[in-house]
Image (spheres, grey):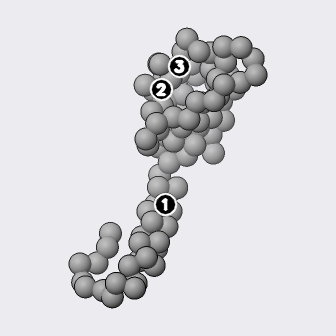
Amino acid sequence: MKSNMPHRDHHAPLINLITSRIAGAMAAGIFVICEYNIRRDALPRAAAITPGRRAPTVSPLEEEGWFAVSSMVEKKNVATTMDEHWGGAYPDFQSG
């Protein structure tokens, strides 16, 4: 995404910042964040279905044995990804 033309060293931080922002904007157009609550025993399967860009964020909930999962999913795959989880029933599921 960067130019191969030489540039002045003092411009490098600004160029890197702009490049990072453009990459973030491009990712925001492709991915959405999916959040859902799930029981502990389903966590391994959930992580396999919604691995995220790096890894899902998993946080314990107040109710024993339940966790909140947050993961990046390609917009075009949200419905099929959730079908893999619950066969079309989306308890405690949110994307946006």
Using the image as rendered, state which of residue 23 and residue 40 is in the foreground: 40
Residue contact between numbered discs 1 and 2, judged by CB atoms under 8 Å: no
Residue at 46% x, 73% y is: 18
How far apart in space, not on screen, are marks 3 and 2 (Cα)? 6 Å
Residue 16 image point, x, y percent: 41, 72
Per the model, the C-alpha gap separating discs 3 and 1 is 28 Å
Q: Which mark is residue 43?
A: 3
Query: Can you say whether 4 is above or below 82 in the image?
Result: below
Q: Quadrant of residue 11?
A: bottom left
Per the rendering, the mark at residue 47 is 2
Quadrant, the N terminus: bottom left
Q: Which three-letter amino acid code belongs to the residue tagged 3?
A: Leu
Task: Give the residue displayed 47% in from the left and 26% down from the top.
Answer: 47
Res 77 seen here: no
Image height of 25 relative to 53, above or below: below
Label 2 residue SS: helix
Residue type, label 1:
Gly
Crowdedness near tag 2: few (<14), some (14–19) or many (≥20) residues, C-alpha within 10 Å:
some
Farthest residue to the front: give it.
10
Which one is earlier in the sequence, the residue at label 1 or at label 2?
Answer: 1
> Please, what secondary structure does the residue beneath circle 3 have?
helix
